[in-house]
Image (spheres, rainbow, N blue to C red):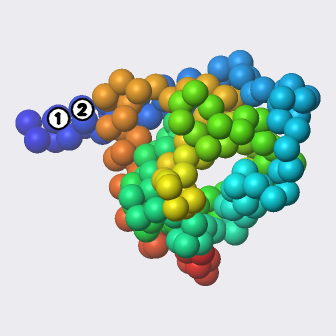
Amino acid sequence: MIKRSAAFLVGTHAVLAAASMGAGTFSPPRIPAPAAVEAANPRCLSCSAPAQLSKVAGKMYRGGGLDAAFLSPGVVFEDPAVCCVGTVEVQEAFRALHAASPESLEEPRLVVDGDNEGATAVFALRQRYVGFLQVDSTLHIHTAADGRISRFEERWNGTPLWKAAPFRWSRRLNGLLSSALTPLLVTGVPPS
């Protein structure tokens, strides 16, 4: 009976994780065009919070890790695969990313300076992993009052994450597993 229950839970988790990741992967792209944003946002970007956030995002997604100084203690990172909570889990997630040989096909591009969901900035990302898997996404970054990052949400193809409880639970379990397994499997890469 225990084996059947465990098999059911593992199978359900796998189906939910695959559905969540598939929704982001196979949805039509919803990434805003840069020209529309540039016309609507004429202020100096090199001296703004979005410019700093772009540098942090660029380093993270090139496999360069994530400096804890930029993160609020309760920071949350979420994408269709994982939900990581706290500085250590989020740093481990981006340390694990290094193992996928990330390649930035272009620098993170600011597409929205603040949005109606409370993000400080939204960036378009174009990445390649393990030499062939290209992922276009939007990265929604929320900051706390002190300017440190309080939440990241990566939306593959710009598709919003499925918020129903089973999908949230599946992503959270993946985040916990990632945090526990990355130190054992990814060696030689410091967390920041």
Secondary structure found at label 2: helix
- Residue 73, compared with residue 105, is above or below; it is below
Q: Amino acid at mark 1?
A: Arg
Exactly how many numbered labels are in the figure? 2
Q: What residue sits 67% from the left and 43% below the top? A: 121
Quadrant where the C terminus is found in the figure: bottom right
In the image, residue 69 lies at what x, y percent? 55, 73
Give 21 or 156, whichever is nearer the viewer: 156
Q: Is residue 177 left or right of residue 39?
A: left
- Residue 191, compared with residue 164, is above or below; it is below
- CB contact under 8 Å: marks 1 and 2: yes
Q: What residue sits 78% from the left and 26% below the top? A: 32
In the image, residue 20 lies at what x, y percent? 49, 29
Give 137 or 103, whichever is nearer the viewer: 137
Q: Amino acid at mark 2?
A: Phe
Mark 1 neighbour density, 10 Å: few (under 14) some (14–19) many (20 or more) = few
Residue 34, picture quadrant: top right
Q: What residue sits 72% from the left and 22% below the top? A: 30
| Residue topped by disc 2 | 8
| Identity of the residue furthest to the left in this view | 1
Q: Is residue 50 left or right of residue 92?
A: right
Quadrant where the N terminus is found in the figure: top left
Mark 2 neighbour density, 10 Å: few (under 14) some (14–19) many (20 or more) = few
What's the mark number on residue 109?
none
| Residue topped by disc 1 | 4
